[in-house]
Image (cartoon, coloured by chain):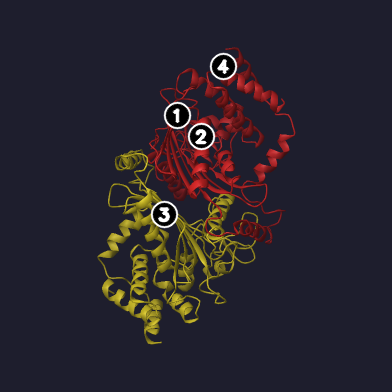
Chain colours: A red, B yellow
Amino acid sequence: MKKTKLKTILKKIFLKYGLSNSHSSICSNALINAELVGAYGHGLSRLKMYCDRIKKKLINPKPKIKIKNISSSIVHIDANNSIGFVAADIGIKKAIQCAKKTGIGLVAIKNSGHYGLSGYYAEKAVKKNLITMIYTNAPPAIPPHGGLKSLFGTNPICFGSPTNSKIPFILDTSISKINRGKIRVAARNNKKIPAGVALDKNGKPTTNAKKALEGVQLPIAGYRGSGLAWMVDILSGVLTGGNHAGRVKDPFDDFSGPQNIGHLIITFKSNLFAKNFKKRIKDNIKTIKRIPKIKGTKKILYPGENKFSRFKKNSNKDILINKNIYSDIKSLLKN
Amino acid sequence: MKKTKLKTILKKIFLKYGLSNSHSSICSNALINAELVGAYGHGLSRLKMYCDRIKKKLINPKPKIKIKNISSSIVHIDANNSIGFVAADIGIKKAIQCAKKTGIGLVAIKNSGHYGLSGYYAEKAVKKNLITMIYTNAPPAIPPHGGLKSLFGTNPICFGSPTNSKIPFILDTSISKINRGKIRVAARNNKKIPAGVALDKNGKPTTNAKKALEGVQLPIAGYRGSGLAWMVDILSGVLTGGNHAGRVKDPFDDFSGPQNIGHLIITFKSNLFAKNFKKRIKDNIKTIKRIPKIKGTKKILYPGENKFSRFKKNSNKDILINKNIYSDIKSLLKN
């Protein structure tokens, strides 16, 4: 399907579910971006879920978002259970404004929901020459080290930096061995997941995606990964006023209340300390790319390059829509 | 040896090497703390190295440290090749001041050196009820993903948070599978290192500590660990004006110039957004500790608890000084 056609359809759906024109546009763009970068677990596979949650009044299609300017650098946003895309869009805009004005911006958001890819928002700030860090929590997927119950989300750590080229440095890494979205897509399509990334509900290793969703995902790097996930839970949950300690509801399975996800955004000017930052980052990347490579590696890539390539490649093509999603779209347009 | 006696001896050595009384005290305290928390790779095993570098004029014992207040929240420090402990001590104090005054502090330091444990400084800010993030780069130890040459340091990520108890949450995790300091201690004592943490200079797995120091250490979590190490290189090196892209000199082996390590500190008030932060973090930790545990795990511990226990246990005992270090101390007092 053509991007423009898909956007028209998505907007139509969000408008039908009560979102404003501009909010519908924000959501549609975020979903299409996820498809274009190949992050299918954050794209159209979630469309029906968002609509279901709006219908059940767990996502507020007409949120009264409260923005509290604590200082010219610090902002607290109560997203009033808006769809996550809208909350994150406002959050990153405020963070950019603060950093442009004072050098640094710190924005905390509560009462939000799943917003897709952190890197999508980081990119917006990086394009304004800002260093950007974004933290968000997520429904339970990973146990703390030594624990037998999922409690932390996949809790991504996102970091972005300008590179003096059109391809930004965007590290957007989940703390789980694989992304929960990918397991969802596998479950939906009856595909297996790699070995060693998840345990079933009895604590046994599994490659069955559905069983993995009922069990626990494994963190990267053992106790260190568990510590990083805990850090993200504090930054995005405890600190912001969002849910934490395993209380973020799974958006697909748990309709007992809104998610109240929290996000934390830190941005600052890249040339605050070294005025020749652009030259320095260019030299950094060039030097690192030049070192000897292991057999089979053609190029050393920085985080974000692969995603950018996929985006570029896919932007010139029609967006492939699988059967399940096509039927979701058809029924959402009807109902 | 008694702590007080050790401190007197260490101060005497640093004074002899030209440091001021207060700087000698700062350095001695940091080294003793590393011994007390059991981080031997950051303690007395480095004493001779610091003195050697002072003697060779690579560490400046009488630094003229320049502090530039960019705003009431943002500070840039040129440490003038001071010993890292002194630069970090000033850095964390400035970061605390900024956060206390404006809610947030961002401090970048360049022309510094190895400062021991990031967590030691984070603790100082956490005690003032601040959330703290500290990044520092280090001599090449880890190759970028796909590379055959060490280039990134062990580049620790440090995060601290108040807990409403006397034991702070301090995550201080190196991006290498094991700490380079531990490999140094093993090499010094002719001990083996665990399998799977390092390759020799030909790219072959090794458990020989000396060969590992000549080769490359492996990052946690493959390409994700490599991305995190790259992030730390940008934050602490490219951004601050410090060395980066593999140019930080190994303090033990490379006497061709000063290290010019960079550090970046971010601090902010923990109660900026949720006024009941203390209650929230207490609830977070309590909830997480209560979940079912895997066989053999008695308690779920948060990052920092183990270190705190070691500190408490060791604080009541004499500090054990091994033969090699004892001979270092004797010769440093003489020369």
Number of numbered discs present? Answer: 4
**What residue do we see at 52% from left, 30% from top?**
A86
**Residue under numbered circle 1:** A65
The span from disc 1 to disc 4 (Cα, nearest Å) is 21 Å
**Do labels 2 and 1 touch, CB within 8 Å?**
yes
* Three-letter amino acid code at the position of disc 2: Ile
Q: Comparing marks 1 and 4, which lies closer to the viewer?
A: 1
Looking at the rendered structure, the kind of residue marked 1 is Ile
Query: Dot 3 falls on which chain?
Result: B
Q: For marks 1 and 3, give the one nearer the viewer.
A: 3
Question: In x, y percent, where is residue A90?
Answer: 51, 34
Q: Quadrant of the C terminus of chain A?
A: top right
Q: CA distance from mark 4 to mark 2?
A: 22 Å
Check disc 4 and report the residue beneath it. Answer: A16
Labels 2 and 1: the sequence-earlier one: 1
| SS at mark 3 in the image | loop
Which disc, if any, is residue A90?
2
Q: Marks 1/3: CA distance? A: 30 Å
Same subunit, tags 1 and 3: no
- Element at badge 4? helix
Task: Report whether mark 1 lies on the same chain as mark 4.
Answer: yes
Kindly indicate whether the residue at mark 3 contacts the one at mark 4 (C-beta within 8 angstroms).
no
Q: CA distance from mark 4 to mark 3?
A: 48 Å
| Of the two numbered discs 4 and 2 in the rendering, the one whose residue sits closer to the viewer | 2
